[in-house]
Image (spheres, helix red, strand yellow):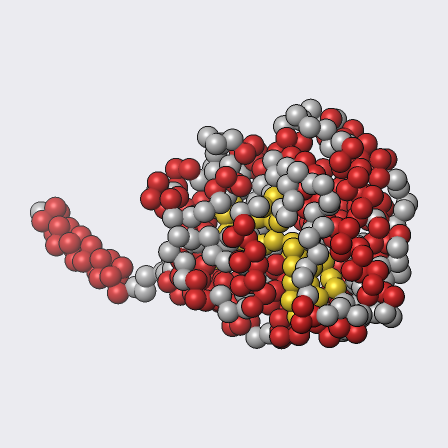
Amino acid sequence: MLKKYLRPKLMLLCSVLLLTVALSPIKAQEPVTVVFWDNLFAVDETRPPEEEFVFRAIAMFEEENPGIVIDRVHQAPDLGTFDQLLRAASIAGNGPDVFNQFAGGSLISFAPFIEPLDSYFSEEEISQIVGWDSVRNDFRTDGELLGVPYGAGSYFAIYYNRELMEQGGVDMENFTPPATWEELIALAQGIKENGVQPFAIGEQEGYTGAWVMATLVGGLMGKDVFFDMRSRETPINSPEWVQAYEAYRQLYDLELVNVDAGSTPSGDGQLQFTQGGSAMWIQGGWANRDIYDVFGENTGLFPIPTLAGSVYPGGIAGGPNIALSVMNYSQHKEEAVKFIKFMVSPEILDMYVEINQTEPSNHLQADPTVIQNPLLQAQAEQLLSGLTIYPFDNIMPGEINAMFYRLNAAVFIGQMTSQEAADQLQAAYEGMQ
């Protein structure tokens, strides 16, 4: 009797419970947050966010993937500072899910903390993107993919203010860019004699020296010299390295730059140039948009020239800049890879080119018509020669690069001899064995 009495009661109770659950609001699943450390996608704080590539790309990704939030953390653009911060966070296992870093040696130095991407990308996906050799571990043809190369790269150049060049005595109607470093020095001396400052440089961080040395040493020793230095087949303190350092410091010794160049930050050097303080300025292609926005048709560029007698004359230094990578301690690897794949889709890469006008896309399905900046168009034409040099600091480990930048500034203003700096770099690299 008791069972017969309880059975309908239990059935009624179960029905009430099921109805209660069914009518209860279902708690929405919390979105996954992917932390993205970014120090390479340039952002101009004076522009509306919707005009900046990285903000627009993230917003588009989040709209297409409502279950994923990208937490972009802007990091210091100083490469040494970012390297130390990322390494410390990675050792502790509390760094980002995704980060960007310079492709090549700087990226490879973080290999112990990076999730190889080989299993995440199909052969078809890999075949559509150019530049994978710059992100393979230790530059081996079979090395793990430590990241995805982003963009076709930037190349180092000398920008000029056409008006000031003319005031400096240069016939711009018939101007032929100098073919050698020696011709560049002669050009600068002529401009100075006519009362115009030839160069504005901010060399406090040592970046200008890195761009010049890439060109001069690569020209003297060939396009593969920095790979040979990394593999220790060629010493860093070779006579050609010292020769290149001596040529580079001519800019300061001959007073062809602002007197405070050694203590001036790189950004202030750009400001001096854009405010009409010099006829020329040394920088990479990432400055194309800013310079054209300031000067319009009153500007132009030409590659940093190699030294006379170079075995690789006319070599243009530069190459893939940005790589996007995933940390192996990330708790959200799948979501992080999904974000990277979105970023390297042809449409988003085209948007990157269209907005920034600093470098071409590295996707085979790229739309070349989005390149509108005459400076970028000129660089693209110059690169048709195929004489490119992948720079020292794109190949060497981050610790050596940080020392390289510091020594560049010291050599430039005469605080250290070229030989002393070369020997210190060599000793430091030997100590890493």
At x 53%, y 63%, the residue is: 377
The C terminus, quarter of image: top right
In the drawing, does residue 169 fall left or right of residue 360? right
Quadrant location of residue 246? top right
Q: Is residue 73 visible?
A: no
Residue 342 locus on image (x, y percent):
41, 55
Residue 213 locus on image (x, y percent):
72, 45
Q: Nearer the viewer, residue 8 or 302?
A: 302
In the drawing, does residue 300 fall left or right of residue 251? left
In the drawing, does residue 359 fall left or right of residue 333? right
Q: Nearer the viewer, residue 127 or 307?
A: 307
At x 61%, y 39%, the residue is: 223
Q: Nearer the viewer, residue 101 or 316?
A: 316
Residue 390 locus on image (x, y percent):
60, 43
Does residue 186 lie above or below 357 as drawn? above
Q: Nearer the viewer, residue 120 or 319?
A: 319
Does residue 394 lie above or below 42 as drawn? above
Q: Is residue 167 visible?
A: yes
At x 88%, y 58%, the residue is: 255
Quadrant location of residue 26? bottom left
Residue 147 locus on image (x, y percent):
50, 43
At x 43%, y 62%, the residue is: 368
